[in-house]
């Protein structure tokens, strides 16, 4: 029994070291594979109880584990959609063959080189499509469930795509000359034209006339603001009476705004609504008593700051992804637009994930359930663009392990050879 157990232990050792050599071979073969996670082989002794003081060799068995929680070094690239995760978290992806199937079988990866395919989807050479939450028209990300991939969609961006957005808000900041409302002033109108973009991306303008009220004596500190829309044939869309205070503490700021035509002025926001040809537009002139709103000071008319949202039709020229996972499209008009948000998935036990082809992983019972975090929030790290994650294989360490495995395998083979010779001697006793 003892000699037989020695033979069995030797055979088990050969098998165990062959398993270890297989993992070493795989690690070395993938030493240049981006995102590869090395596999480690552990040996475990098997003890068999002996009888009557005799020892019975139990042998050895092995287990293997892919160390997914280990991180490789990050290397920079020249592609804005090369992605890597710094610290904890994984990028959601899916197989390109599932596009249009109506199902999303989410896989996880720690890095990927994504480039637009003919349909604009961001895909790796191995056929993995980047997943994200699409942004609303205003760039905001809707509230979505974080424990399911149901809301994730393949990221699709078409370079050279035309895009524009209408103007819905306008901020007017200017100074009106206080001397223009004094008795005997010339009463000259101050004209101002502000460009905006209609629903089709065409350039239009709100033409503004600022008419001072000239009193017979003293100062009126009053102006009439008339707004006309070029898209409506120059029709008046609003008329407002602006009165300014000359008090010691708030001199030159708005005292009251009275609507003659157009939407009512809201003193809480400093805005009113007017209807241009394409729909309502909110115009902000500042709150009552606000020194940063429209003012009436000195003798100079000065448009200080005129801003509005919206953009003319432009062609997409590039795509970038920031550390929080927001995907931005940049246009030749100089504007940018938030298109998607790429979350990072986290599981309690990353090493329990099921390893699949192309350095991808699937949640399993051993890994625990996943949760989709905003990059940089919770336990997850940042999402880094222009970067790839290198393999976690250290070739020098693997070669050292190979030498050890070779010696152990040779020694195990020697044990089998010795047992065979001993059995031969036992057989020769009969002779």
Image (spheres, grey):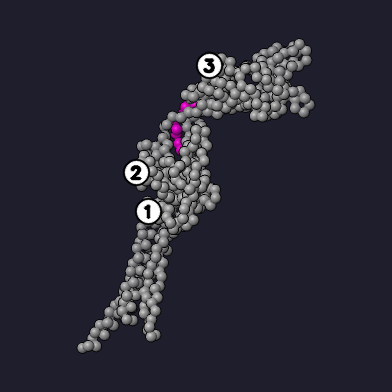
Q: Which residue is mark 2?
A: 97
Residue at 41% over, 70% down: 44
Which image quarter holds the N terminus? bottom left
Q: Which residue is mark 3?
A: 232
In this rendered view, identify the residue nearer to me: 11 or 87. Answer: 11
Q: Which mark is residue 356?
A: 1
Please tell me whether residue 347 is drawn above or below residue 305 in the rendered image. below
Q: Is residue 150 left or right of residue 310?
A: left
Residue at 50% over, 23% down: 198
> Mark 2 vs mark 1: which is more N-terminal?
2
> Mark 1 vs mark 3: which is more N-terminal?
3
Q: Secondary structure at mark 3?
A: helix
Distance, label 2 to label 1, CA atoms, is: 16 Å
Distance, label 2 to label 3, CA atoms, is: 50 Å
Figure label count? 3
Residue 340 in the magenta stretch? The answer is no
> Mark 2 vs mark 3: which is more N-terminal?
2
- The reply to whether residue 410 is in sight is no
Q: Residues within 10 Å of mark 3 (few under 14, many from 20)?
A: some
Q: Which residues are magenta?
A: 312-321
Q: Quadrant of residue 12?
A: bottom left
């Amino acid at each position: 029994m003892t000699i037989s157990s020695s033979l069995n232990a030797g055979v088990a050792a050969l098998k165990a070291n062959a398993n270890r050599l297989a993992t070493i071979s795989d690690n070395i073969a993938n030493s240049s594979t981006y995102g590869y996670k090395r596999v480690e082989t552990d040996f475990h002794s098997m003890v068999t109880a002996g009888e009557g003081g005799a020892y019975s060799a139990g042998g050895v068995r092995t287990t293997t584990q892919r160390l997914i929680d280990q991180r490789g070094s990050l290397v920079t690239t020249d592609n804005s959609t090369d992605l890597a995760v710094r610290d904890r978290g994984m990028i959601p992806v899916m197989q390109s063959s599932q596009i249009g199937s109506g199902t999303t079988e989410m896989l996880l990866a720690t890095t990927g080189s994504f480039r637009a395919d003919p349909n604009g989807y961001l895909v790796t050479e191995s056929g993995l499509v980047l997943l994200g939450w699409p942004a609303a028209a205003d760039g905001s990300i809707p509230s979505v469930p974080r424990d399911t991939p149901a809301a994730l969609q393949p990221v699709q961006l078409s370079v050279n795509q035309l895009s524009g957005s209408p103007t819905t808000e306008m901020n007017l900041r200017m100074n009106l000359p206080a001397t223009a409302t004094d008795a005997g002033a010339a009463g000259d109108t101050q004209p101002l034209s502000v460009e905006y973009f209609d629903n089709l991306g065409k350039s239009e303008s709100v033409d503004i006339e600022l008419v001072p009220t000239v009193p017979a004596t003293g100062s009126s500190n009053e102006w009439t603001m008339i707004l006309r829309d070029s898209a409506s044939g120059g029709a008046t869309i609003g008329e407002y009476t602006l009165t300014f205070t000359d008090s010691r503490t708030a001199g030159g700021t708005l005292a009251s705004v009275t609507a003659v035509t157009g939407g009512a002025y809201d003193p809480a926001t400093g805005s009113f609504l007017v209807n241009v040809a394409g729909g309502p537009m909110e115009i902000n002139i500042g709150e009552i008593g606000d020194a940063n709103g429209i003012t009436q000071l000195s003798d100079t008319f000065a448009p200080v700051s005129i801003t509005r949202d919206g953009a003319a039709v432009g062609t997409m020229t590039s795509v970038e992804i920031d550390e929080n996972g927001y995907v931005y499209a940049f246009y030749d008009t100089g504007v940018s637009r938030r298109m998607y948000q790429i979350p990072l998935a986290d599981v309690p036990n990353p090493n329990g994930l099921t390893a699949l082809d192309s350095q991808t992983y699937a949640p399993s019972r051993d890994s625990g359930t996943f949760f989709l975090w905003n990059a940089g929030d919770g336990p997850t790290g940042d999402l880094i663009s222009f970067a790839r994650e290198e393999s976690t294989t250290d070739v020098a360490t693997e070669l050292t392990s190979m030498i050890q495995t070779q010696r152990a395998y040779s020694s195990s083979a020697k044990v089998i050879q010795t047992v065979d010779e001993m059995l031969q001697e036992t057989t020769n006793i009969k002779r």
